[in-house]
């Protein structure tokens, strides 16, 4: 059974999910938001310290070259889901849900509300990119709020003070409003910090609608879809598609507390759903 690295700040990746759900819960007051940092889980704080210090422009390009060529393997969606299932921490007393059950929980919440089949599928797919941890990538290169590199950091990114330790802070060309980009160039031309969002987007983009592609690629880009940051880099097309990202976000944040999915009962539905959109194996 595969475990997260002993020196990792998070006991399990779900700690980051729980932090995000609390930080962005609906109905939260502005005062609570301002005070939240001082009350944050110390392990999550340390995670972001590492993330912000080490997600440099050069690092992002290196990891995109390594993984986004999709030359690592050829597996089915189900094989990757089963592989992700080995990412557990047996010492955690607070959850006994498997990774597949987490994916099904999100998808079932979307299905219950009557959304299109591709939307339901997106809920099932969105965290599969976390297999990066099983490839040996550190947590700070797999999860965490994403943000553009190559331009100045927004104070709407969680723990912005930790960017002071990032080497890119000393590169003047990277620390202007637009940085290396052009105004409203479109997010497709912008490099975000690397993680599971980009990986699952690249692996599945040929098979799902563009709305789903945006959900997968930008669901951790909270500074943009929750706070309106970085709009100077977005074009009209981005603005339109981000409405779908916001719709998906509610399910990503708030589905974990719902009832445990009856996996064996619903599995045939998801087997049919996956086969509708994907061939037997895809490139990873």
Image: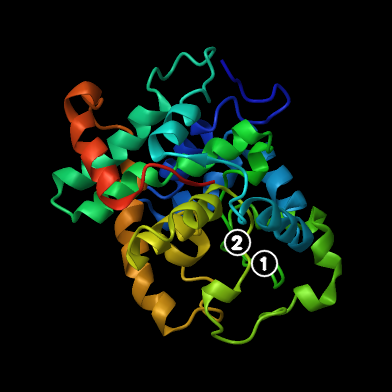
Nearest the eye: 200 or 233: 200
The 10 Å Cα crowd at callout 2, few under 14, some 14 to 19, many 20 or more, is many
Q: Which mark is residue 260?
A: none
Label located before the other in sequence (1 or 2): 2
Question: From the viewer's perspective, is 61 left or right of 118?
Answer: right
Q: Position of residue 251 (x, y in %)?
A: 30, 47
Decide if residue 42 is in sight here.
Answer: no
The 10 Å Cα crowd at callout 1, few under 14, some 14 to 19, many 20 or more, is many
Question: From the viewer's perspective, is 218 left or right of 53?
Answer: left
Q: Quadrant of residue 77?
A: top left
Q: How many marks?
A: 2
Nearest the eye: 96 or 104: 104
Looking at the rendered structure, the secondary structure element under dot 1 is loop
Q: Position of residue 141 (x, y in %)?
A: 66, 45
Q: Which residue is mark 1?
A: 153
Relative vertical location of residue 17 with respect to residue 174 in this rendering, above or below = above
Q: Position of residue 146 (x, y in %)?
A: 57, 56
Looking at the rendered structure, the secondary structure element under dot 2 is loop
The answer to whether the residue labelled 1 contacts the one labelled 2, judged by CB atoms less than 8 Å apart, is yes
Residue at 52% of width from left, 79% of height from top? 186
Residue at 70% of width from left, 21% of height from top? 6
Residue at 54% of width from left, 18% of height from top? 89
Relative vertical location of residue 69 with respect to residue 10 in this rendering, above or below = below
Q: Which residue is mark 2?
A: 147
Position of the N terminus, as image quadrant, is: top right
CA gap, disc 1 and disc 2: 8 Å
Residue at 61% of width from left, 31% of height from top? 134
Relative vertical location of residue 40 with respect to residue 170 in this rendering, above or below = above
Q: Quadrant of residue 104?
A: top left
Which colour assignment does the render follow?
Answer: rainbow
């Amino acid at each position: 059974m595969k475990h997260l690295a002993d020196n990792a700040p998070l006991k399990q990746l779900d700690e980051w999910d729980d932090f995000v759900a609390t930080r962005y819960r609906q109905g939260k007051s502005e005062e609570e938001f301002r005070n939240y940092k001082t009350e944050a889980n110390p392990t999550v704080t340390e995670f972001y310290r590492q993330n912000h210090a080490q997600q440099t422009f050069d690092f992002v390009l290196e990891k995109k070259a390594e993984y986004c060529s999709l030359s690592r393997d050829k597996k089915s969606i189900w094989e990757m889901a089963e592989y992700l299932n080995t990412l557990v921490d047996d010492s955690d007393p607070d959850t006994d849900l498997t990774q597949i059950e987490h994916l099904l929980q999100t998808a079932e919440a979307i299905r219950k509300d009557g959304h299109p089949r591709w939307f339901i599928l997106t809920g099932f797919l969105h965290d599969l990119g976390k297999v990066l941890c099983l490839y040996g990538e550190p947590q700070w290169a797999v999860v965490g709020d994403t943000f553009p590199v190559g331009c100045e950091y927004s104070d709407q990114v969680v723990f912005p003070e930790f960017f002071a330790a990032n080497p890119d802070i000393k590169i003047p060309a990277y620390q202007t409003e637009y940085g290396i980009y052009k105004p409203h160039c479109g997010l497709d031309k912008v490099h975000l910090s690397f993680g599971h969002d980009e990986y699952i987007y690249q692996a599945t983009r040929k098979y799902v609608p563009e709305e789903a592609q945006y959900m997968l690629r930008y669901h951790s880009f909270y500074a943009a879809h929750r706070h309106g940051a970085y709009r100077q880099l977005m074009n009209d097309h981005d603005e339109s598609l981000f409405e779908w990202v916001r719709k998906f976000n509610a399910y990503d944040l708030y589905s974990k507390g719902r009832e445990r999915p009856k996996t064996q009962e619903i599995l045939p539905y998801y087997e049919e759903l996956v086969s509708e959109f994907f061939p037997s194996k895809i490139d990873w």
